[in-house]
Image (spheres, rainbow, N blue to C red):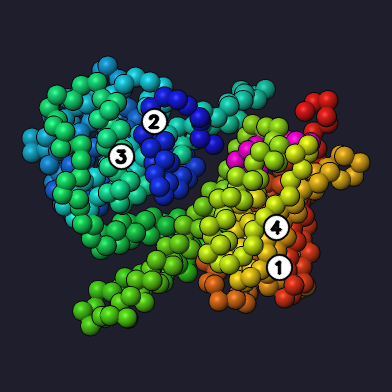
Amino acid sequence: MNIATSEPSLYQLTQDLDEPLVPLSVGAETLKSYVSSVIELLIKEQLQATVWVKLPQTKSWLNQMQRLCQEGNVKSIVVCSNQRNHSAVSLLKDTSAKTSIVPIKLNQNSTLQRESFLIVLATDFCSLTLAQWQKSKIEIAASGKRLQQPYLEMVSSFTPQAITPVLLGIKQNSVSSASLKDEDFSLNPQPIVKTDLIGKLVLQQISQNERVQTALNSLSKTNHIAKQNLTVLGLQSDFLSDLVQELRAPITHMKTALSLLESKQIKGEQRQRYLQMLSDECDRQNSLISGLLGLLQLDTPTQAEYLRLDDIVPGIVSTYQPLAEEKEIQLGYTIPANLLPISCPRPWFRQIIINLLNNSLQFTPPKGKVFVQAALKNENEQIEILIMDTGVGIANKEINKIFDGFYRTKPTIEDKVTGAGLGLTLVKQLVQRCGGSISVSSKVGKGTTFKILMPAIPAELA
């Protein structure tokens, strides 16, 4: 959940673009892993780049930048900081004489202090990695254990259009940048990004995934551990086995496509087909990672809120109107204005509705309908939320399996199904953890209705 603020924010600039960058909620280790991959690419390819960096003031992050100075071929590193003590600059200057180290002091507002970034600018490559710490509420158990940790909202991009406003934002919020000129804060000329460099970055991520897969294989083969101890969010050890299979398939396909693209004999339509295969498998991998992150975050206590559906559902539905129009699907909702609120973390409820809308729009053919409806039920004790569509429907033998991890119904329309099969698993977990229940009814060729029942907040409390 992004924290609303009137203070200057580089992260917010990425959300105000015509096509906002999609944020991902991650932990500090995930951010560090991704930044390490980018730095590894700079070193392996010996890219002559300018690097803009603002990272946490810890030894492990500083070691990353020192390694880049020692082993890389970067022209300059612009070190941005809100701190009065700029010790990182002197340490980096002592590390390498061939790399120019330029310090910039930023405004000391609380939002900028919570933001970290790595920007790479080269003639044939550019990238942006930007993250903002979110102030989660930290609860202390009787044992003294911290039950909730802060997290990061992270975005990334390889397009100059996303990087330019962030550079301008750095300029506007800099207190001292005497050694830099106005043109240093612009992309002129704009980099022409080589797709093979992005492919190598993908390979870097694949290598990390393979290490994770090896660890998961080792874990799933430890048969002497009792089955009840091998659970992930209530899912038994076969969940781990399925996860290994889901990780292996896209990795194999991507490696195959990349090896074929290296052949000089592959041209024209064949080349485009393999590029599309690579893109599809990257989408599949991203879907899997997003689904797994969503499931893993369920074990982090989250602050519940009183939510009024008429404040949330219309905005979500309007976001999907362009997609529905493109697919020639009629999309609408009916939410009474006087409906009692429910108790649920806002990000959780948004995820529930978004996943179900995505599902309905994916499996509804042109000229079909998708509708969201809510009403009071059971003597005003529950809110019933219906997500209905006139799509292809679900066979009776599959109804009981759709909430299982990694289960995907067989596609019966032309659209490709690239999801990881974790969307409905996540929805069920979120609904249940808010004290609700979810069920589904469907007829093949007629459509599907998901019904959610959530406890209503009594009027005197609302």
- The residue under label 2 is 9
Which range of residues does the magenta coloring cover? 340-350
Q: Quadrant of residue 114?
A: top left
- What amino acid type is highlighted by mark number 4? Phe
Residue 212 seen by the camera: yes
Please state which of the two labelled residues, at mark 3 or mark 2, is closer to the viewer.
3
Q: CA distance from mark 4 to mark 1?
A: 9 Å
Q: CA distance from mark 3 to mark 4?
A: 38 Å
- What amino acid type is highlighted by mark number 2? Ser
Q: Is residue 345 magenta?
A: yes
In the image, 333 versus 90, the foreground residue is 333
Please state which of the two labelled residues, at mark 2 or mark 4, is closer to the viewer.
4
Q: For the residue carrying disc 1, how many other residues have a C-alpha within 10 Å: few (<14), some (14-19), or many (20+)?
A: many
- The residue under label 1 is 390
Q: CA distance from mark 2 to mark 4?
A: 36 Å
- What amino acid type is highlighted by mark number 3? Pro
Q: For the residue carrying disc 3, how many other residues have a C-alpha within 10 Å: few (<14), some (14-19), or many (20+)?
A: some
